[in-house]
Image (spheres, coloured by chain):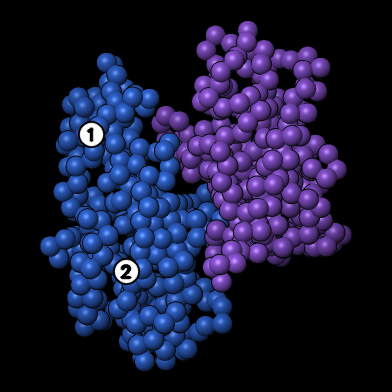
Chain colours: A purple, B blue
Amino acid sequence: MQYKKRYDGRGHDETRPIIAKAGVLQNADGSAYFKIGETIAYAAVYGPREMYPRRLADPKRGVLRVNYNMMPFSGPGERNRPGPNRRAKEISMVSEKALLPAVDLEKYPNCVIDVFIELPQTDAGSRCAGICAASIALADAGITMQDMVPAIAVGYVGDTPVVDLSYDEEQPEGMEAVDVPVALIPSTGEITLLQMDGIVDAEQLNTLLEKAKDACAVIAQKQREALQEKYLGDADEE
Amino acid sequence: MKNKQGPNSTGHLITALQADVRYDGRTKNQFRDIQIEYGVSNTADGSAKITCGNTEIICAASLSVGSPFPDRPDEGALMVSAELLPIAHNDIESGPPGIDAIEISRVIDRGIRESGAIDVKKLCISEGEKVWIISVDVVPINHDGNIIDIGAIGALAAIKDAVFPGLTEENTADYKNKSKNKIEMKHTPIPVTVCRIGDELFVDPTKVEENNIEARITIAVLENGKICSLQKGGDEGFSTEQLAQAFDLAVKTSQELQQHLL
């Protein structure tokens, strides 16, 4: 079944509106705000700092630790109990693996770099928004990185491939949906996050990955602009 | 248990406070500037982000339908939960709420509850069966001290911002079809925490000041200047003279802060 006009009127390859800011939290060594559609992610980086307990430290390289958390009121419907659940723990893990290849941890032996992702409001695509925010925050903290790590969900609604599924598109009425969150390192093309809900054939997946690549290029640009805005600033303001 | 940190010591702070100068240039009785932004989370029923100096807190009010307590069959309930998340400060570790977070929750909760700010009888849907429960989350995203006072103002702002969800025919909450009803607030009890180092009393501590205080007292005050809840904290005590001074300072400061919730 064809899904012609998207529920919110976007083009099929168009992401929801994005706002990205670097350096939004004073106490953190690096931080970012990333809003895509109605999903908002804050990320803070603390470190490189000493690892406790010490036995978790690696004398050869630093350790990257990512924690993803939805605030209790950030989902649809009733408030959830605070604290990590199975879902949050898994997303923390895959987000960590998504960022890991881009971070040069050899520079920080014995240390830990902690990344905390907090979501006060979500619609869909919260893990991708979290990774996008975390990547800006890591760069803001001055951590040596190979590149930014943009992330986006791509998928099918009915037979139509779309970029950046909204909450309604994840469970469309009378159609099947496929949801594939992807993170990648644009300069090398390395895909560092790949999950899927739904049923597709291999060829369709290849189509989706191409779409993800294009969308990620757009997002990486927004991430860089956020950093430029903080560090280069507006000439008129100074 | 004292947790002294940073380049500051109690000695330095006393000398500065005696000259009525704080590290950030404020006087002892001066609160930092407060800004409140409403509606920061559209998934909550009411929300506000409050910024006071470098302390930034996201507060949200969530409404759900639940059962009343057996001894109060016609009353709804209010529950405040504060979380100290590691995103907010270098010192905070991940894990279940520690005693700091629990104290913050309970003190904010007590101030709002004991003042009768919310008419809990109006939260009753059907007696003995269903009532509205207001859950308020206080989540600092940047911690630079005084989470109790700032969090309480944020909590009141989130409650003020809240709109009830709709009700289905079976009396369950319908989050897709919101009503137009707001939570009726009879009072706005704003707590002021007065801190003591030596003989010096001051309000609105930063994190560094907070780490070096000897005693503190949180005094929640109604619009009319009446005091509705107390909590003494810190390792040491207060003399009655110091307390009298603290009450005056809290009442005056709280009344000045009322303007933020108008």
Inter-mark Cα distance, 1 to 2: 33 Å
> Position of A165 compared to B139: left or right?
right
Name the kind of residue labelled 2 in the image: Thr
Residue at disc 1, secondary structure: strand
Residue indicated by mark 1: B181
Q: Chain of mark 1?
A: B
Vertical arrangement, residue B59 with respect to residue A230, above or below: above
Query: Quick check: A109 above or below A119?
Result: below
Q: Quadrant of residue B246?
A: bottom left
Q: Secondary structure at mark 2?
A: strand
| Number of numbered markers | 2
Q: Is residue A68 above or below residue B90?
A: above
Say yes or no: labels 1 and 2 on the same chain. yes
* Residue drawn at 32 percent across, 76 percent down: B30
Tell me residue B208's x, y (percent): 49, 75
Q: Which residue is mark 2?
A: B193
Measuring from the top left, give residue B106's x and y in whole percent: 34, 54
